[in-house]
Amino acid sequence: MSATSLVIDRHVATLTLSRAAVHNAFDDALIAELIETLHRLDQDDALRALVLTGAGKSFSAGADLGWMQRMAEASEEENRRDSLQLAKLMRTLNNLRMTTIARVNGAAFGGGVGLIACCDIAIGVSSARFGLTETKLGLVPAVISPYVVEAIGARQARRYFQTAEIFDAREAQRIGLLHECVEDERLDVAVEAVLQRLQDAGPIATRTAKRLVMHLQQPDTAVAINIDNHNASLIAALRVSPEGQEGLQAFFDKRKPGWAAQ
């Protein structure tokens, strides 16, 4: 069964994470499917934009519980290979030639925040909540860090990467994760307004404008690959470390880890 759904209309692709029962959480199958779909869409020169959204009440809850359990029991090298796949997904989305819009219909945590940060434009509902909660598990948001830091800046990242606190949509807009925060019933209106502005702009010019900004802000391919490799190794080492193992096991046991205030 497909973990995503795709609709193409008026030169716009709408890609929906379709695992509503688990709040559109990531697992290896969803990551592989997203990579394949994004690569295919990127070859279609007729497409002007991609809208990425989630089914149900959440955008994406981050890592799937079953996937986390498998990775907690895997070797460091297996964790590294797994993390590189997530890095590939983020870089693929970030580097799409067309304009990308995150239609943030609900909560986003961990890797879900990474997906939002990889999109050119992000519009979210006021009821959404966000969090980079990895340190509660003895981990860090390593793979998504290049995109989240670019979106919210190093100053805000230094706070939210460390505290793992939950923040609301207004704060997400204030720090730069969201461009717009709208009432739930106005989400589609706001996304359509952006799509209309894109339709009024030159198709070659919009793609060129995106490349211009990326050229100024981001490292070349070789540097980017080194960053991905470093971050994948970092998270793999933490997952198999005593602190990471305790944090993950405490999460599965629904208890506080040993280092937390009891």
Image (cartoon, rainbow, N blue to C red):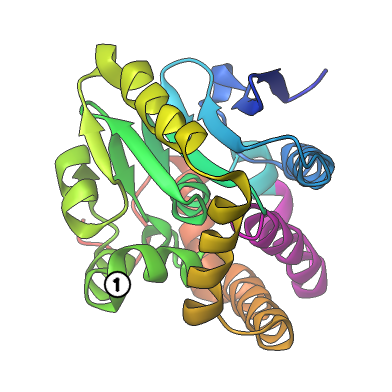
From the top left corner, tell me how far across and down residue 191 is, in percent.
Answer: 39, 27
Viewer can see residue 143? no
Quadrant for the C terminus, please. Answer: bottom left
Q: How many marks?
A: 1
Q: Nearer the viewer, residue 90 or 107?
A: 90
From the top left corner, tell me how far across and down residue 220 is, in percent.
Answer: 66, 84
From the top left corner, tell me how far across and down residue 203 is, in percent.
Answer: 60, 45
Q: Identify the magenta region.
A: 70-96
**Up-down relation of residue 200 to residue 84 (above or below):** above
Crowd around label 1: few <14 · some 14–19 · many ≥20 (10 Å) = some
Disc 1 target residue: 153
**Up-down relation of residue 214 to residue 166 (above or below):** below
At horizontal 30% and vertical 46% (from top left) the residue drawn is: 178
Q: Secondary structure at mark 1?
A: helix
Viewer can see residue 89? yes
**222 to the left or right of 125:** right
